[in-house]
Image (cartoon, rainbow, N blue to C red):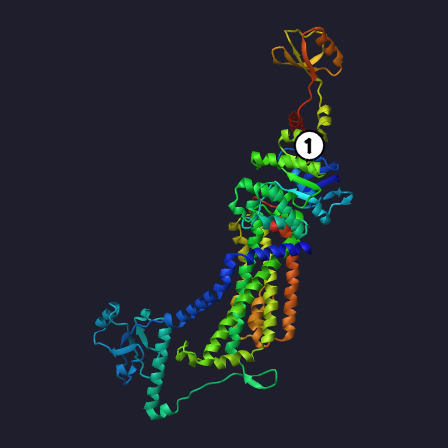
C-alpha cells in the first residue's frame, strides 16, 4: 500500500507542477470553446456559398414568369431559344444553370432537370427542390380556385412540444435537445480524457523502460503496485484538471449570467434577447444528481479500464514507433463507442442498440454517459457499472502480468504473440 | 548474510541459472565473474527481488527473501537510468522513499551525500541538464541512500568514466568498513584482485568455482616456479620438468612434473651459487578466468 502511495504522489506532483499542465488547465476551456464555436460557425454559416446564382428557367406547361420564382440569392431568367448558347453560358460560368420542367402535370415533376448541377451543393439542390415543389403546389391550389389570401390565412405555425412526467409527477418540458447536448458533452469529455490520460499512463511506463529506470524501481516496488500507483496518480491529475475546468466554467457562467441579469452595457442588446432564462430553467429541470453520479462512475471506470491496457502497452514496447500496432485495436472499441453514442443514442437513447452498447464494458463508459440524462433505469446503471468494474479488475490483473515481464524485455519489438507468452509465463 | 542454495532459473526452455549456490558472509565483498551471457544479471535480479527463482531458495539473514527485505537491499543494475525531467533532489527522495525510508530521514541523507560529494549546487538541476558523469554520481547515490545492508552492483565499473569508477571503488571499500555486504559482477580482474574477499565464476549458467582469491589461486597452482640468476646456468638433466620458459636472460619460469619434489629444484638452484631470486608462481585471476571459461 505504501509504495502505491509513493508512486501515486510522485506521478501526481511531477505533473501538477509541470508548466504545460498549468497552462493547459487555464487555456483548454478557451481553446475548446473556440474550437466548437468555430466548428459550429463553419458548419452553419461559414460553409454556405453566399454568391448569387442566376439560372435559366423553362417550363412550357407552367404559367409562371421566371422572376416570380426567384428567391433569396437565386434568380431565374427566361430560357433562351438557342440551347447551344445557354449551354455555352453555363460552361463559361456566366450562368449557374438551366432548370427545365417539361411535365404537363405539375403533380409529377418526373422530368424536371437542372443542367449545371455540379455548381450546386447537395443542400442547395435540396433547397431548390423544396422551393419548386412548394411553388408548384401553391400554383395547383390557386388553379383549383383557392385564392392567394386563403392560402396565407390557412398557413400553420408552431409545432409539437415534447413533455414528460417528472419525478414529482408533474408534467414538464422534456428538453430533449438539452439532454442530448448534455449527454453528448459528457461522452465527449470521457472519450477525450480516456485518450489523453490513458496515453499519459502509457508514456510514463514507456519512459521508465526506455530510460532504463524501471529495473531499479521494480527492485523496490512490485510491478503491480507501480502500475496501480501510476494509473491512480494520473487519474487524480485528470480529476484535478477536470474540477479546475468546472470551477473556471462556473466562474465564467456566473459572470455571464450576472451580465445578462443586470443588462450590463458590456453585452450588446441583441445578445440579451437570447432565451437565457429558458435555458437555465431547462438546466435546473435536468436530473443533475443522477447525471453527475453516472458521469463520475463511468468516467473513472472507463479511464481505469483503458489506462490499465495502455500501461501494459507502454511496458511492452521499446520505442514510440512500436506503439501503433497495439494502440489501434485497443482504441477501436472506444472510437466505435463514440460513433454509437453520436448516431444511435441521438435517435433512440433507450433503444436496443443503446442498451446493448451501454452494457459492454469497452463501450459502456461513453454510451452510458450519453444516455445518462434520459432516465436510464437504475438496474441498468448498476449492472453495467459492475460489469465495467469486473472487467477492470480482470484487465489490471492481465496487464500487470504483461507489465511485469515487459518492463525487463529490451531489444526486439514485441508482437501480440509475445504478449500472450508473457501472460502465460508470469 | 545471504545464502543462495540450488537456484534454478529458466527462460522458456533455456536454463539460465543452473543449480547455483552461494554463501555471503557479513561485511564481505563478493565478486561475481563470468563471460557475457553466463547468467550473472539473472542471478543478481533474483537477489534484488526483481524476479524470483524457478527452483531453489534464497535466504537473507536466515529468512526467505521477499518484499519485506527491500529496504535492506541496494541494487544498481547494469542497465541504468534516471528520470530526465526530475530534479536531482526529487529523484533521490523518490528512490529513497520507494525503499521505505521516511521522508525526513531521506532528506537528511540526500543532504549528507550531496555535501559529501561536493555537489550541493546540483540539487535543483534537472537530470537532462547534467552531464553523463554527473548523472553517474547521482545514480550511485540513489543506490546507497537508504543505507542498505546488502549492496548488489551489476558491472559497477562499466559505463562509468575513470574518475567516477575510482569514486565507486573508494565508496565500496568505505561501505565495507561500515559493515555493508557487497556483491558485484565485473569483467575486470584488476578490480577483483583489488576489492574482493571472495569470488565465484559462473559459466553457462553454472558455478564453476568459488572461494577467496588466495584459495582460488593456490588451488590452481601448477607447480610453476620463477627463478632468476646472476649469471648463465644450465638446467641439470635429472630435474623432471614439463616446461621451461625463458623470460629474460638468466630468468626462467619452470613447470615441474607433479612428482618432482620442489626441494630438488631449490637444492640445485642454491648449489649454482648464482641464485638471485626464487619463488612459486601462482596463476593470476585473469589466467584462471580464461582457463575456466574456455575449458568448460
Instruction: State the residue position of label 1.
Output: B196
Q: Of residues B266 and A92, which is closer to you in this image?
A: B266
- The number of discs equals 1
Q: Nearer the viewer, residue A388 or A236?
A: A236
In the image, residue B41 lies at what x, y percent?
65, 39
B67 left or right, relative to A191: right
Residue sitting at x 53%, y 60%: A196
Q: Which residue is more in the foreground, A299 or B82?
A: B82
- Local secondary structure at mark 1: loop
**Residue A305 spot, x, y in % from top left:** 61, 61
Q: Quadrant of residue B147?
A: top right
Drawn side of residue A55 relative to residue B255, left or right? left
Residue B296, how many percent across, how many down?
A: 68, 29
Residue B160 horizontal side relative to residue B11, left or right: left
* Residue B137 coordinates in the image, percent (x, y): 58, 41
Quadrant position of the N terminus of chain A in the picture: bottom right
Q: Residues within 10 Å of mark 1 (few under 14, many from 20)?
A: some
Quarter where residue B256 is shown: top right
Name which quarter of the figure residue B278 lies in.
top right
Give the chain letter at badge 1. Answer: B
> In this picture, is A167 found above or below B249?
below
Q: Is residue A213 above or below residue A90?
A: above
Amino acid at each position: 500500500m505504501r509504495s502505491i502511495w509513493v508512486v501515486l504522489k510522485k506521478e501526481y506532483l511531477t505533473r501538477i507542477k509541470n508548466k504545460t499542465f498549468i497552462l493547459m488547465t487555464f487555456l483548454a476551456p478557451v481553446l475548446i470553446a473556440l474550437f466548437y464555436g468555430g466548428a459550429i460557425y463553419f458548419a452553419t454559416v461559414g460553409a454556405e456559398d453566399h454568391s448569387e446564382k442566376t439560372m435559366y428557367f423553362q417550363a412550357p406547361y407552367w404559367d409562371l414568369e421566371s422572376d416570380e420564382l426567384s428567391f433569396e440569392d437565386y434568380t431565374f431568367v427566361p430560357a433562351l431559344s438557342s440551347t447551344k448558347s445557354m449551354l455555352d453560358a453555363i460552361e463559361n460560368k456566366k450562368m449557374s444553370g438551366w432548370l427545365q420542367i417539361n411535365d404537363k402535370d405539375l403533380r409529377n415533376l418526373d422530368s424536371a432537370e437542372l443542367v449545371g448541377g455540379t455548381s450546386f451543393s447537395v443542400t442547395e439542390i435540396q433547397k431548390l427542390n423544396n422551393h419548386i415543389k412548394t411553388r408548384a403546389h401553391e400554383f395547383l391550389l390557386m388553379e383549383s380556385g383557392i385564392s392567394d389570401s386563403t392560402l396565407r390565412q390557412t398557413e400553420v405555425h408552431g409545432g409539437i412540444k415534447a413533455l414528460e412526467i417528472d419525478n414529482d409527477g408533474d408534467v414538464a418540458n422534456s428538453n430533449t435537445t438539452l439532454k442530448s447536448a448534455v449527454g453528448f458533452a459528457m461522452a465527449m469529455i470521457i472519450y477525450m480524457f480516456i485518450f489523453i490520460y490513458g496515453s499519459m499512463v502509457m508514456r510514463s511506463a514507456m519512459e521508465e523502460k526506455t530510460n532504463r529506470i524501471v529495473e531499479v524501481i521494480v527492485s523496490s516496488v512490485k510491478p503491480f503496485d507501480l502500475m496501480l500507483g501510476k494509473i491512480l496518480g494520473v487519474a487524480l491529475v485528470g480529476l484535478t484538471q477536470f474540477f479546475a475546468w468546472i470551477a473556471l466554467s462556473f466562474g465564467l457562467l456566473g459572470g455571464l449570467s450576472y451580465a445578462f441579469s443586470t443588462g450590463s452595457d458590456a453585452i450588446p442588446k441583441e445578445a440579451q434577447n437570447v432565451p437565457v432564462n429558458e435555458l437555465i430553467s431547462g438546466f435546473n429541470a435536468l436530473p443533475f444528481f443522477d447525471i453527475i453520479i453516472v458521469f463520475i462512475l463511468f468516467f473513472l471506470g472507463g479511464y481505469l479500464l483503458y489506462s490499465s491496457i495502455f500501461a501494459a502497452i507502454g511496458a511492452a514496447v521499446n520505442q514510440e514507433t512500436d506503439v501503433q500496432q497495439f494502440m489501434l485495436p485497443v482504441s477501436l472499441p472506444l472510437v466505435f463507442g463514440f460513433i454509437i453514442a453520436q448516431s444511435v443514442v441521438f435517435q433512440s437513447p433507450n433503444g436496443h442498440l443503446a442498451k446493448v452498447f451501454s452494457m459492454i464494458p469497452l463501450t459502456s463508459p461513453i454510451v452510458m454517459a450519453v444516455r445518462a440524462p434520459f432516465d436510464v433505469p437504475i438496474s441498468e446503471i448498476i449492472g453495467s457499472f459492475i460489469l465495467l468494474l469486473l472487467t477492470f479488475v480482470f484487465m489490471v490483473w492481465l496487464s500487470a502480468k504483461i507489465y511485469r515481464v515487459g518492463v525487463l524485455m529490451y531489444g526486439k519489438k514485441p508482437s501480440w504473440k509475445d504478449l500472450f507468452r508473457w501472460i502465460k509465463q508470469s | 548474510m545471504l545464502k543462495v542454495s540450488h537456484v534454478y532459473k529458466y527462460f522458456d526452455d533455456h536454463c539460465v541459472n543452473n543449480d547455483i549456490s552461494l554463501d555471503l558472509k557479513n561485511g564481505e565483498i563478493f565478486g561475481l565473474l563470468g563471460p557475457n551471457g553466463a547468467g550473472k544479471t539473472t542471478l543478481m535480479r533474483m537477489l534484488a527481488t526483481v524476479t524470483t527463482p524457478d527452483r531453489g531458495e534464497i535466504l537473507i539473514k536466515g529468512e526467505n527473501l521477499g518484499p519485506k527485505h527491500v529496504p535492506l537491499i541496494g541494487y544498481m543494475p547494469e542497465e541504468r537510468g534516471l528520470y530526465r525531467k526530475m530534479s536531482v533532489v526529487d529523484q533521490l527522495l523518490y528512490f529513497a522513499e520507494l525503499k521505505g525510508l521516511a521522508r525526513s530521514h531521506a532528506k537528511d541523507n540526500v543532504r549528507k551525500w550531496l555535501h559529501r560529494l561536493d555537489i550541493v549546487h546540483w540539487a535543483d538541476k534537472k537530470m537532462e541538464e547534467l552531464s553523463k558523469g554527473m548523472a553517474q554520481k547521482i545514480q550511485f547515490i540513489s543506490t546507497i541512500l537508504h543505507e542498505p545492508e546488502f549492496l548488489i552492483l551489476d558491472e559497477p565499473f562499466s559505463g562509468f568514466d575513470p574518475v567516477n569508477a575510482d569514486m565507486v571503488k573508494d565508496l565500496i571499500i568505505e561501505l565495507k568498513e561500515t559493515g555493508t555486504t557487497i556483491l558485484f559482477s565485473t569483467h575486470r580482474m584488476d578490480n577483483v584482485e583489488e576489492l574482493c574477499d571472495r569470488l565465484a565464476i559462473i559459466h553457462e549458467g553454472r558455478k564453476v568455482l568459488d572461494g577467496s582469491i588466495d584459495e582460488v589461486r593456490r588451488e590452481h597452482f601448477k607447480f610453476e616456479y620463477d627463478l632468476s640468476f646472476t649469471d648463465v646456468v644450465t638446467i641439470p638433466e635429472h630435474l623432471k620438468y614439463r616446461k621451461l620458459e625463458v623470460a629474460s636472460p638468466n630468468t626462467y619460469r619452470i613447470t615441474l612434473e607433479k612428482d618432482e619434489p620442489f626441494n630438488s629444484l631449490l637444492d640445485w638452484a642454491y648449489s649454482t651459487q648464482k641464485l638471485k631470486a626464487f619463488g612459486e608462481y601462482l596463476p593470476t585471476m585473469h589466467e584462471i578466468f580464461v582457463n575456466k571459461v574456455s575449458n568448460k
